[in-house]
Amino acid sequence: MIIVLSPGFLTTVQDEGRRGYRAFGMPYAGAMDRYSLAAANLLAGNPPGAAALEMTLTGGSFRFEEAAYVALCGADMGAALEGAPAGNWAAFPAASGATLSFGPAARGCRAYLAVRGGIEVPAVLGSRSTYTRAGVGGVGGRALVEGDILRIGPAPSAGPLPARRSLPGRLVPPPCGGEVRLRVLPGPQEEMFASDGIDTFYSSPYKVTDRNDRMGYRLEGPAVRHKGGADILTDALAPGAVQVPGDGMPIVMMADCQTAGGYAKIGTVIGADLRLLAQSRRGDAVHFLQCPEKEAVAALREERAAYAAIRERFPDAGE
């Protein structure tokens, strides 16, 4: 088991998300940076969607009450195992009684701590992900607090723990933060925007405001002009959707977004790029790039090919 000595700013249990319940009003939840979650799990020897810890801006401190094999991916929070630098985009054994500590993220926003066997909390509607607004999943449906006890699930495969290993450089994304470019599929209500409003959206830089969380990122910059009003008959929302309310400031929906909304949507950030925004913080610049469907499909294939490459390099990586 793992003892939470310090929870950090916002640390929750997340997996690949809660699928199949949006028609009933339940958001996906799940990791904000799906690539970092999957890479950490594969390095640890788990399936890519296993439950892990998502730390935000500042990481916590954890003591292992049993020997474990852990992996770290995402934002670099200066991890230290028993005071010695632990690195990032890497996996390593942690002895019984060892403490793994994190500090503030040097760049980016979210880091993932996976442990072989996964974090074992009760599954709710098929997922262990924490959705704090409804108090669902994870540990009591909330962020971790000091003194929480996390159980480790059974290892997917028997045998001795591997030695330290790292993700090959070609599979490590560039450091996030500062400025990001997000590819966008146009629509579904693009026709509600003036032509100069659409041009503004794709040609102007926007800034991440302090109104950003797991539900959505509010941006500020040049106003995106509608042809008429911004309101629509409420329809479905999904992570990546870009709503533009009456003030013309884009709002990008994230993992915990509501299932329906009543503002016109100018486009949808492709799934492979949404992690870039999830790793952004207040003041970072955001640029939107119009993207054809075939490019979005190619980006998804590249992401899946990266998972396959990790499995090929580490034969014990989970399926």
Image (cartoon, grey):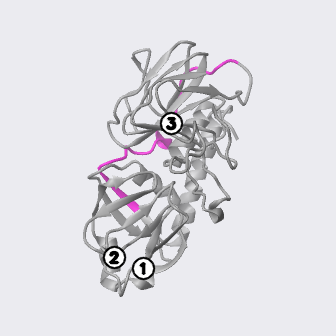
Q: Which amino acid type corresponds to the residue marked 3 in the rendered image?
A: Pro
> Mark 2 = which residue?
246
Task: Assign a secondary structure to mark 2.
Answer: loop
> Mark 3 = which residue?
168
Residue at image x 39%, y 45%? Answer: 174
The answer to whether residue 315 is left or right of residue 79 is: right
Task: Assign a secondary structure to mark 1.
Answer: strand
Q: For marks 2 and 1, give the CA distance.
A: 8 Å
Q: For marks 3 and 2, give the CA distance.
A: 46 Å
**Does the magenta run of residues contain 90?**
no
Q: Which amino acid type corresponds to the residue marked 2 in the rendered image?
A: Gly
Q: Are marks 2 and 1 in contact (CB under 8 Å)?
A: yes
Q: Are marks 3 and 1 in contact (CB under 8 Å)?
A: no
Question: To which quarter of the image does residue 212 belong?
Answer: bottom left
Quadrant of the drawing holding the N terminus: top right
Q: Which region shows up in magenta?
A: 160-182
- Mark 2 vs mark 1: which is more N-terminal? 1
The answer to whether residue 211 is left or right of residue 127 is: left
Residue 261 is situated, as x and y percent measured from the top left of the image, at: 49, 70
Q: Tell me if mark 2 has few (under 14), some (14-19) or many (20+) residues whose alpha carbon lies within 10 angstroms of its own.
A: some
Residue 199 is situated, as x and y percent measured from the top left of the image, at: 32, 78
Residue at image x 33%, y 76%? Answer: 246
Residue 79 is situated, as x and y percent measured from the top left of the image, at: 41, 26
> Which numbered marker is on residue 85?
none
Task: Assign a secondary structure to mark 3.
Answer: loop
Residue at image x 48%, y 34%? Answer: 89
> Which numbered marker is on residue 231?
1
In depth, the one of 240 and 235 nearer the eye is: 235
Q: Characterize the magenta stretch by its predominant secondary structure.
A: loop
Quadrant of the drawing holding the C terminus: top right
Above or below — where is 32 with respect to 287?
Answer: above
